[in-house]
Image (cartoon, rainbow, N blue to C red):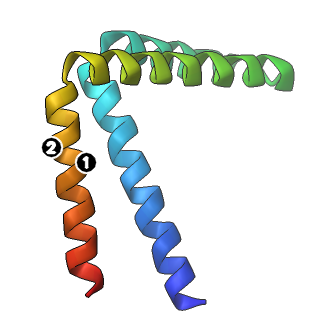
Amino acid sequence: MRGTLRDFLLTAFAFSIVVTTLIAFDSRVREQVMLRMDSARATADVVAARAQAGSLTAAIVEAGREQTRKNLPTVIFVTAGVALTMFMLRT
């Protein structure tokens, strides 16, 4: 149970870092987040919130794909580095 909780917290932390980085570096994602924050306070409609979440997710995925295509060698290097670090920490 304790290991599961720790893994969940590490995953949530990593996800929050990725989303925060996207918000910091991509103006489209930042704009969508700001629109959602203002609209979320103004409305309590669940359907509108669901549509907004879908739109935000689409913007994040689009920005991630575009950045991955632009920086493919760096993405491969970072992915390999993370994988090697994870294997090193597990042993």
Question: Any mark on residue 79, and which?
Answer: 1
Q: Residue drawn at (52%, 69%), measured in percent from left and top?
A: 8
**Quadrant including the N terminus:** bottom right
Asked if the residue at tag 2 contacts the one at tag 1, i.e. Cβ–Cβ closer than 8 Å, the answer is: yes
Q: Residue drawn at (46%, 78%), measured in percent from left and top?
A: 6
Question: Any mark on residue 31, and which?
Answer: none
- Give the residue type that dot 2 points to: Phe
Question: Any mark on residue 77, and which?
Answer: 2
Q: Which SS class for mark 2?
A: helix
Would you say 88 lies left or right of 50 here? Answer: left
In the foreground, 85 or 52: 85
In the foreground, 43 or 49: 49
Q: Residue drawn at (43%, 48%), measured in percent from left and top?
A: 15
In the foreground, 41 or 76: 76
Query: For the residue carrying disc 1, how many other residues have a C-alpha within 10 Å: few (<14), some (14-19), or many (20+)?
Result: few
- Give the residue type that dot 1 points to: Thr
**Quadrant including the C terminus:** bottom left
Would you say 72 lies left or right of 47 here? Answer: left
Where does residue 83 sit, x and y in percent of width and height? 27, 61
Q: Residue drawn at (47%, 68%), measured in percent from left and top?
A: 9
Where does residue 21 sit, x and y in percent of width and height? 28, 34
Q: CA distance from mark 1 to mark 2?
A: 6 Å
